[in-house]
Amino acid sequence: MSGSRKLRDRGTGMGMTVKTVTRWLKGPILLFGIYLVLYGHVTPGGGFGGGVVIASAFILITLTSGELAGLSIFSKGAASRLDSVGLLIFLILGWLGTWWASGYFFENFISTSETAYHSVLSGGTMPIGNLALGLKVASALFLVFTVLSAFQIAGRAIDGLTDPEEQQREDKS
Amino acid sequence: MIYSLCLLLILVGLYGVVVSRETLKIVISILIMNHGVHLLLLLIGYREAGNPPIVDPGASIASFANGAVDPLPQAMVLTSIVIGLGVLALMVALCVRLYERYGTFDITEIRRLRG
Amino acid sequence: MMAINVQTLIPLFVAIPLGMSLLVQLVARRRHAVAETLTIITLLALTLMSGLSVGQSGIYHLGGWPTPVGIDMRLDALATLLLLVVSVVGLAVSLYSVDYMRRFTARSHFYSLFLLMVTGMNGVILAGDLFNLYVFLEVAAIASYSLVAFGCAHEELEASFKYIVLGSLSSALILTGVALVYGMTGTLNLAHIASRIAETGMSMPLLLAFGLFICGFAFKAALVPFHAWLPDAHPSAPAPVSAMLSGVLIKALGVYVLARLAFNVFGIGANELSLLRWLGLLSMVAGGLLAVGQKDIKRLFAYSSISQVGFMVLGLGLGTPLGLIGGLYHLVNHAMFKPLLFLNAGAIEYATGSRDLRQLGGLNRQLPVTAATSMIGSMSIAGIPPFNGFWSKLIIVLACIESGFYGFATAAVLVSIVTLAYQLKVQRMAFFAALPEALKDLQREPPMMALAMILLAVGCIVLSFAILTGLRDPWLIGAAQQALTAGIFGG
């Protein structure tokens, strides 16, 4: 299994220029994604948009330096687990709303003062929800990409994959 | 008038689904159709010379409501795009698996089920 | 025991199966026993919760936001009925899967997707606004697409591709309808839309939207001009999934939403009702006639599903209280006996490895539980008097006569006879004909499979007694019918 992987991997790495540019770019892209997630409740963006940008950084690495490089940073198992964890955090956040105060699911139970509006800490539970969704979207997209790229056409070995389980959630961003 | 362009896009997608013989082309046609629907939704929330639906610091809610475009269709389109992404990933995975099994993308040759 | 406020249960109908589906992915990836236990416990909890919410109603404001701003979930008698059906069938199916799914790898994925499908259906049933309805519909649909392809063999992939293409088309139609309704009424809340439409009447775009909804949801319910995916998708899936798809998915996603939109939201008139009636008649007749010639036992049941959905829509399309009762009663009955029949078919396939009626025979000695429960299921679906199917079909026929549609009544009676014919064919060829040599020494059904089938058979018998509370007010169903005719509340 790993033998065929390496064989495949030798060819997929791109040229020196592309790799260098990617090395410079991946940091800013990640940072921009994280910014989008964190500021989701005050500016356009949010969990989904930010998550997509974060995933695109990993996808860029995979595309330029080969599949192994991408998977060494973010393995399939980890992505799958983070995918579930992100949504679970989101659900627990909703349940905490029931449990905490007046008892509504997804109640925003962290109160904020009016003066704090338009700053990062003004959203109550919303930034946490955005973070959870960002985690989920980033790992899910990366997972979809790696799983689809792991398909090998013409009956060659397919490394232990199952259908990419699409757990679509409405995006609250 | 511009609504009819969305309708046209939807019909182009529908035509593609009906006429295409390759699985991947069908997938692309469905995408086109979906985007026609998304554009229609966005157009419904559009208002001429409207502002982006973001409340600036210090702005009153009334002036915001008077000037901004309707944000709800945008949220709906975003959600719908997410759903579309999931369906797309599943469809492409199915296409690849079908190719593995049948060795073709041609739907006229993928015919085992009858009756 | 402390009193439970049903209001707080409403979001949990969606949250619990969703959370459990994630948990199964997270902790039970390799430990299949854990996945099975978690699924069964979840469905048990859902059954209990829906049992508790019988007779209750309420609107839940998600996040405490008031109605036009926030997302509403609404529970009424009709929703309760559907929730109960989904949970009970889901429970039986999850029990059945324990033994049946042993031959598949990656079983935890199956349970995860199964719970996701339950999430989607519960969400559709409880959704208080049009867009969330669409979103949950897609959640359930995506889960069902992948479940149909679960075995990854030739037929399953092909069926799933067909299903996903037609499903996406219908979803696009539905979304266009949602966009049009939002553009015309300026709101997505079902109650608000209903009151706006009551004020302004149906305009052309709204009529177009309603037409799009009828097409879209008729796809999901597999009414006849839109049924092409069902006879492929339902038989190709693993038996528990077929049971779930035929038993509740086409109803929760198709018939229920169609009824909700037609009666509670759009308040449709005579022309639209006659459209529903004709759609019902067409699928009733065509499905029944196509079922007779089938050799594959699951394919036969799939065509029979189309025919039975036709009965329901015919009942609903009458628009009279009795017709609605007939339609809803038949919906609940069909949700008991069709999963039962599909599970029987699965048990036969599990034991003999074949679904072809020509290769089967004499199984009533070899598989006693399957034979007995299948007999109950067949008699129910064919409308033999003491069983539940008889009562619901009787009510539909009576409602047709009451409204003066003698032709429809005759057709319904004739299709019942056709139903009897193809069920007798299954009984004769699978259970009573001479036993082929190849099937001499079969294993009996595993205990969990037998338990699931007995559970559903008991459900059929219990539903036969629902009629005791009155022809015009069967147990639970009368209240659901009143929820449909009383108009949507709150908002």
Image (spheres, coloured by chain):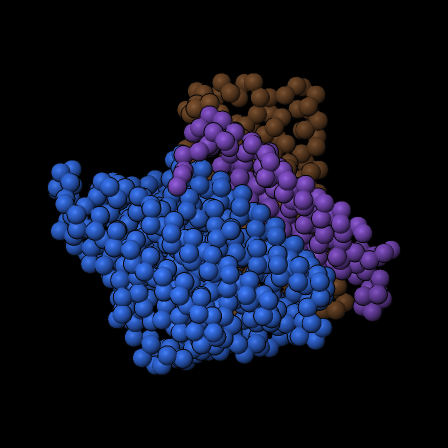
Chain colours: A brown, B purple, C blue
Asked whether, in this view, residue B32 is left or right of residue C140, the answer is right
Counting every numbered tag in the picture gives: 0
Name the residue nearer the viewer: C296 or A61.
Answer: C296
Residue C244 can be seen in this image: no
Q: Is residue C139 above or below residue C357?
A: below
Name the residue nearer the viewer: A90 or B20.
Answer: B20
Residue at 71% in and 37% down:
A28
Location of the C terminus of chain C (image quadrant): bottom right
Where does residue B64 sit, x and y in percent of width and height?
Answer: 82, 64
User: Which residue is outermost to the right?
Assistant: B49
Residue at 84% in and 62% down:
B67
Residue at 62% in and 59% down:
C211
Where does residue C231 sit, x and y in percent of width and height?
Answer: 41, 47
Classify residue C350 by image quadrant: top left
Location of the N terminus of chain C (image quadrant): bottom left
Where does residue B42 sit, x and y in percent of width and height?
Answer: 73, 53
Name the residue nearer the viewer: C114 or C270.
Answer: C270
Residue C307 can be seen in this image: yes
Q: Is residue C83 above or below residue C117?
A: below
Classify residue C151 by image quadrant: top left
Residue at 36% in and 71% down:
C394
Where does residue B104 sit, x and y in percent of width and height?
Answer: 49, 26
Asked whether, in this view, residue C228 is left or right of residue C353, the answer is right
